Image (cartoon, helix red, strand yellow):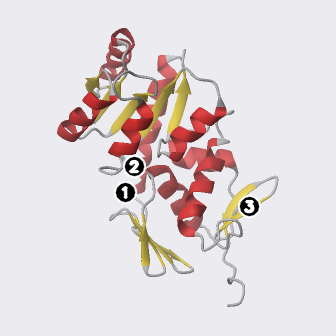
Amino acid sequence: MSQTIMIVDDEAKLRDLIRVYLEQEGYRVVEAGHGREALYVARVEKPDLIILDLMMPEMGGYDFMRAFSKEAETPVIMLTAKLEDQDKILGLELGADDYITKPFNVRELIARVRAVLRRATKAATEPDLLRAADIVLDRAGRTVKVGEHYVDLTPSEFAILATLIAAPGQVFSRLDLLDRVSGEAYEGYERTIDVHIRNLRTKIEPDPKNPIYVDTVYGMGYRFAVRKPAGA
């Protein structure tokens, strides 16, 4: 059965162009012209991945992500004409997995789509349960439990934590983690990992400013390293 990709953009010509390339790759494609329409289409069609423009009438991409992230954990690739890092960071903090800046090469976008979807397939061949310290990650159930509490992670945060927990003490560079998250490492995009790491620490660390799980190895990357909390 073909995987379903939803394109959300107010430019009909751009949607048509992306749709042609996706259908040539064998994907089923559904479309929406703005965020409000996208909410309805996503609820009905349940896409496997969403390609989302940020600047749209009626409901923009940011508002769509705020609303839809409460209902599903569908991977999102942002399309943005903005160059400011803060705009990209906001999208990533809202749960987007990747971004590409307009104008872009459609073949690069398709490569990213394949990479994100390939990640999900690869995860199915790996152990379902991973345990380290007092964290339990369940790939099959898509859950993470820290101590006695469950935490909600975006697909990218989940993939990063799974990678780190599976190899405690091993240092992963930003490009290593980007490759695990998206399936390919893109020079210039590795700093998106820093945003995901910051969000992940906010959710799992007792004190995000003094992490005991996700450790920074300066000049190299990140690792899963357990240290006892102060006073323990």
Q: Residue furthest left?
A: 44
Above or below — where is 206 with respect to 36? Answer: below
Q: Which residue is mark 2?
A: 120
Residue at the top extreme of this rendering: 13
Judging by the rendered image, the residue that carries numbered circle 1 is: 124
Asked if marks 2 and 1 touch (Cβ < 8 Å), the reply is yes
- Look at 70% across and 65% down and name the residue there: 209
Residue 203 spot, x, y in % from top left: 53, 64
Q: Do callouts 2 and 3 mark residues in contact (Cβ within 8 Å)?
A: no
Residue in the image at 40% along x and 29% along y: 60
Outermost residue toward the front in this view: 58
Mark 2 residue type = Ala
Q: Is residue 73 above or below residue 152?
A: above
Q: CA distance from mark 2 to mark 1?
A: 7 Å
Q: Is residue 1 left or right of residue 165?
A: left
Q: Residues within 10 Å of mark 1 (few under 14, many from 20)?
A: few
Look at the numbered disc 2 and give the secondary structure of its residue. helix
Left or right, 19 with respect to 173, comes to: left
Q: Amino acid at mark 3?
A: Thr
Q: Position of residue 9 (x, y in %)?
A: 37, 21
- Mark 2 or mark 3: which comes first in sequence? 2
Distance from disc 2 to disc 3, alpha carbons, whole Å, reads: 26 Å
Q: Secondary structure at mark 3?
A: strand
Q: Earlier in the sequence, mark 3 or mark 1?
A: 1
Is residue 167 left or right of 157 when viewed as pictured? right
The residue that label 3 is drawn on is 216
Amino acid at the residue labelled 1: Ala
In the image, residue 127 above or below residue 231? above
